[in-house]
Amino acid sequence: MGLKMQGHHHLVAVSLNEQQLGTKRKYRSYVPRKNQGKYLVLWIIVFWFAAIHVYRCIDAEHQQRIQEGLVSMCDQRARMLQDQFSVCVNHVHALAVLVSTFHYYKNPSVIDQDTFAEYTARTAFERPLLSGVAYAQRVMNSEREDFESQHGGTIRTMANKEPSPHRGEYAPVILSQETVSYLNLLDMMSGEEDRENILRARSTGKAVLTSPFKLLGSHHLGVVLTIPVYKSKLPPNASVRDRIEATAGYLGGAFDVESLVENLLGQLAGNQEIIVKVYDVTNVSDPLIMYGRQTQEGDPTRVHVSKLDFGDPFRKHQMTCRYLHKAPISWTAITTSCLGYVIVVLAGYMFYTGAIHIVQVEDDFDTMQQLKVRAEAADVAKSRFLATVSHEIRTPMNGILGMLALLLDTDLSSTQRDYAQTAQACGRALITLINEVLDRAKIEAGKLELEAVPFDLRPILDDVLSLFSEKSRNKGIELAVLVSDKVPQIVMGDPGRFRQVITNLVGNSVKFTEQGHIFVQVHLAEQFKAVQDAKLETCMNGRSNGPQSKTLSGREAADDRNNWDKFKHLIADEDFPFQVLTSDGNSQNVNLMVSVEDTGIGIPLHAQELVFMPFMQADSSTSRHYGGTGIGLSISKCLVELMGGQISFISRPQIGSTFSFTANFQRCEKNTIMDPKRSPCDDLPTSFKGLKATVVDTKPVRAAVTRYHLKRLGVLVEVVNSLKAAVAVSSSCACSGQPQPDMILVEKDVWLSGDDLNNVQVFGHILKSPKMILLATNVTSGEFDKAKAAGFCDTLIMKPLRASMVAACLQQVLGTRKAEQGKVMANGSVYLRGLLCGKKILVVDDNRVNRRVAAGALKKFGAEVECADSGKAALDLLQIPHAFDACFMDIQMPEMDGFEATRRIRMMEHKANEQQTNGSMDGCCNNRITTEWHLPILAMTADVIQATFEECQKSGMDGYVSKPFQEENLYQEVAKFFESKPATDS
Amino acid sequence: MELNHIMRQSKFTRNSLFEQGYLDEQFTQLEDLQDDANPNFVKEIVTLFFSDSTRLIRNVETALESYPLDFCKLDDYMHQFMGSSSSIGAKKVKEECTQFQECCKARNGQGCIRAFQRVKQEHATLKRKLETYFQILKQGAKTSKVE
C-alpha cells in the first residue's frame, strides 16, 4: 500500500556504476605517460639548433655592419685621395700652361728662376700632394754648349750629380720650386723612371705618372708626374712625331705619396682602426706598393679594394683597406642565444619534472579510485553479509525461543523453570540485538524502505509513553508528551519507523534519567524555528528570572532555550506572534520537529561526537553500568535521514540531554482514507466534548501537557495555579450562571504543598458537583489514603498522561460506564453500548462457536440476542410480526446460505407490507411501505473481500460486518441504522 | 505467594501462546467479553470450539477417504472450521485452514491431505496448550478461593 521510498536503491546503483567504471580511466590525460626522458632530450636538441640559428642571424647582421663600415671608410679615403690628386694634376697642368705662355710665347721670356720659385711657393697650397715642381727644358745635344753657357753650369746626371755624358738629348731642370732647388740643371733624362716618363708624356701630350720609387732627396716612396710643354699649339689630332717635334720641355712634380697620404688620412675619422695600402697595379702580377708598410697585415679576413684613378690611363692604382684588429666577437648574439637556450632548457626540465609528477599523481589517483571503489564495495558487502547473517541467525534463534517456550509449558521443577526462563530472557535479548544489527545493516545496504501510509502520530506517542510508564513510575520520573495543535491529525509516512526512533530516544532517556522529567514534544519545524529565532534575543536580555521552574519538572534541562518562555508561544493557539517562514497551507510537506528532553546524566563532552556512531557509548563504563549496545542512536540517525530529516542533540553533563530531530511527512486529507480496517485516526471517545475542566498546576509546562491531552478529548481547559483560584473560578461561574467546571484536576505536588488542604475539603463538601481528580506520577498508599480523606474520592490519574487513559478515567469518574465495570474500554465501545442497548438482535450462524461468540459480543453491548443455527430457523423466527431490531446473518451456511435467507425474508416483508397498505390505506403513503417492515440484515463474513457490498445489496442486505467482530467496524455499520434513534444511556 | 506464582505462570503461558502465534487478538476480545455476568465465557467458547472442531475433523477425514474427492464438501467443512477458529482467535489453525482451502480451490488432493495433517497437528497442539492454560487458571481460581 502506498509509495515506497526508493532513495537507497539509487545509492546502491551508483556504487555499482562506479564499480564498473573503476577499471577504466575516466579522464583524458594530456601528458605523455612514458618516455618523458626522450622528449626532454629531443627538446634540448631542437632548441640547441634553434639557438645556433638565432646566433647566426644576429652575428651575420653584425658582420655585415662591420663590412659596410670598412667599405664606406675605404671608398671615402680612395675618393679623397683621388680628388686631391686630380686637383694637383690640374694645377701642374696650369703651371705647364704658365710656362709655355710666359716662357716660350713671350720673347724674351718673362719667367726666370726667381719668378717661378716665388710663384710656385705661393701656390704650393694648391698642390698639397706635391713635394715640389720643376721645369726641365728639352735640350738637344747640339744645343748643349749654348745651353750650358747660357745657364752658367753643366748638365748633370741625377744619379751622381756629375756632368752628364753626351747623349742625344737632355732635359736639364731650369726652373724649380725652392723645395726641389737641388734639381737645378739635373738631367731628368738621366733617371730611368723620369726618362721613361718624359718619353711617354711628350708622345701622349698628357700628364703621366711613374711607378713608385724612392724619391731623390727623401727616402719616401713617391711618383713623379710629368707634363709636356709644347712650343706651339698642337692640333688635337697631332701625331706622335709632331708632338715630339713640338716639345719644348717638361714640367714635373714629385708626389711624396707616403707622407702626403699619411697627412690626408690623418684628417679622417677612424684612422686608427684601418690599415690602408695603395698599390700600383699596372703590372697585375707584381703590384708595387705606393703607400703602407708591407709588414702590417691587419685583419686578413676582411679586405676592401677601391679603384683609384689618378688620370694616367697607362697606370692603374688601387687602394686596399683592412681592419687593424680582428672584428670583435658579437657578445649580444652570444648572450641572447645562450640565455634563450638556458631558459628554454630550464622550461623543458620543468615540463619534464611536471609531467613525471602529473603522471605519478594520476597513477596515485587511479589507485585511490580503485581502492575507493573496492572499499565501497566491501562496505556494501559487509552490510549485506550482516543482513544475511543476522537474518540467518534469527531463524534458528526463533526456533530456540520457541522450543524454550514449549519447554516452559511442560511440567518443570522450579529450578528448571528458572533456568529455562533465564535462557529465554537471554535469547530475547539476543534477538533484540540481532534485530537492531539487522536494521542497521539493512539501512546501510540500502534495503530498508519506508512505508508511506496515513497515520496519526498522537496515539503512537501515547503508546510509546505507555511502554515506558512502568519504568518511569518506578523511578519517579515525570514522563510527558505534547503535540502541537498545528501538527495535522494525519500525516503520510512510516509509523513503524517513526515509533522506532521515538522509542529509542525515550528509551535512552529513561535509561539514563534517575530523577526529573522526560518530555517529548512535536511541533512544526517551521514554527519551531521561527520561535527559536525570534526568541533568541529576548532570551539573551531576559535571563534574570532563571531557568528554574520553567521546565516540566522544574529541573534544569540541557537546552534551556526550550523553557516556558519560548514554549508558551509554541502552544499558543491564536495570534502566533512570530512570522513563520515557509508555512503555506498548500504545501504537501509537513516538517515535524520532535524533541525529547531529559534531565539525566547527560553525555560527557568528549563523547558527544561519537554519539551517533554505531556501537559507541559514551564510555565503556556506561555500558557496564546501564547496559545496551549503543547501536540504537545510529539506527535512529539513519532512520531520521531516511525520513528526510536530521537528528541533533544538546547535552550538558549532570544536567541532561535534549535530542531533537526533524522528519518530513506528507500531508494527508482525511477523506482519502478508504480502508476502514486500517483507519489511522485514534479512536478517542467524543462523549466528553464540551465538558469544562480546571487544571490546578503551578508549572505551566506541565499544565500545558495536561491541557493538551484533555483538549484531544474535547474538554475545555482552564489553568489556574492554586486551589483557591480554582474555587474562585468555580464560584464565579456559579454566580454568573455559566456552567461550572465539570472536573478539577489537581497536581499532586500542588495538593501536597499543604496550605490548600482545607480548601479542598471545603470545596469538596460544599460544591459537590465538580469531580476532583488527582494527577500524580507515583503515590504511596499512605498518600492515597490521605488523598481520599482530602476529598479526592473520585479518582487518581497516574502519569504519564495518555489521552485514551485519561478518557478511561474520566469515563469512570463521570459515570459514562456502569460503576461496577472496572475496566474501561476505549475505541467507541461506549457508543456501541449506547446504540445496541436494549435492542433485540437475531444472530444466524450454523457454526456454534461463531454463534456463541457473536452473541456474547452483542450481549456485552447490552443487546438482547437470539440465535438461529440455519437460514430456515431464521425464517421461522422472522415470521411477521416479530420483535427483532436487527439480524446478523452468516453468508456461507449449508442448505440455505445467507443471501438466500435474506431474499426470502425480504419477500416476506414485501408481502406483509403490501397487505398492510392494501388493508389500511390506498397508496397515499407509498413511501412508507419500505420502511414499515424492513429488518436491517447485516452479513457476517470472515472474508471481507469476497463479500463485497454490492453482492450483499443485491440480495437485500444492508451491510456487512467482519467476523470475528471488530468493534469499530461493527459500530460503523450498526450506527447506520440506529443513529437516528439514539438510546439513552445511563 | 503460591497464588502469585500461579498468576505469573498463567500470564506467562498466555503471553507465550500469543508470542508463538497460536493465538491472536480475537482471543483477547473473547477475554474482554468475559465479565461477572459471564464468568466462564472463554472456557465455554473454547470447549465449544473443540467439540465442534473434533466433529468437523472427523467429517473431513471421512470426506478425504471417499473417492473421488468432493472438493465442494471439503471446502464447506473447512469454511466452518475456519470460521470457528477465527472466532476464538486460533491463529495458526486458521492459517493452516487457509492453506487447505487454497488446495481445495486448486483441486489438489495430495495438498489437501498434507494441509489437513498440519491442521490436525496445529489443532492438537493448541488443544493441549489451551488445556494447560485453563488448568493453570483453574488452579489459580482454586488457590485464590482457599486463600
Image (cartoon, coloured by chain):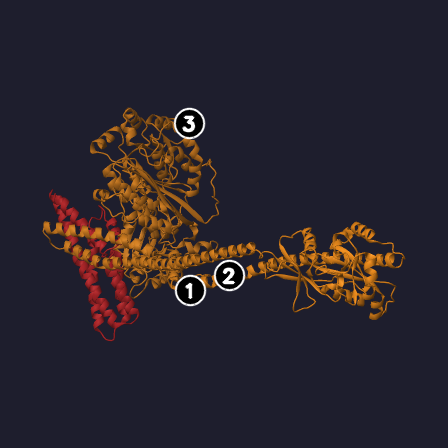
Label 3 residue SS:
helix
Which residue corresponds to mark 2? Answer: A47
- The chain coloured red is B
Q: Position of residue A212 (x, y in %)?
A: 69, 62
Q: Is residue B145 above or below residue A165?
A: above
Q: Mark 1 lies on which chain?
A: A
Query: Distance between the Cα atoms at labels 3 and 1?
Result: 105 Å
Which numbered tag is attached to residue A35?
A: 1
Residues packed near mark 2 inside 10 Å, few (<14), some (14 to 19) or many (20 plus): some
Give amino acid for label 2: Phe
Q: In this view, does B132 lie to the left or right of A350?
A: left
Disc number lying in front (3 or 1) = 1
Is residue A390 in view?
yes
Residues packed near mark 3 inside 10 Å, few (<14), some (14 to 19) or many (20 plus): few
Query: Distance between the Cα atoms at labels 2 and 3?
Result: 111 Å
Q: Where is residue A326 in the image (x, y as percent from the top left)?
A: 57, 57
- Using the rendered view, name the quadrant where residue A517 is placed: top left
Of residues A511 and A685, the one nearer the viewer is A511
* First in sequence: mark 2 vs mark 3: 2
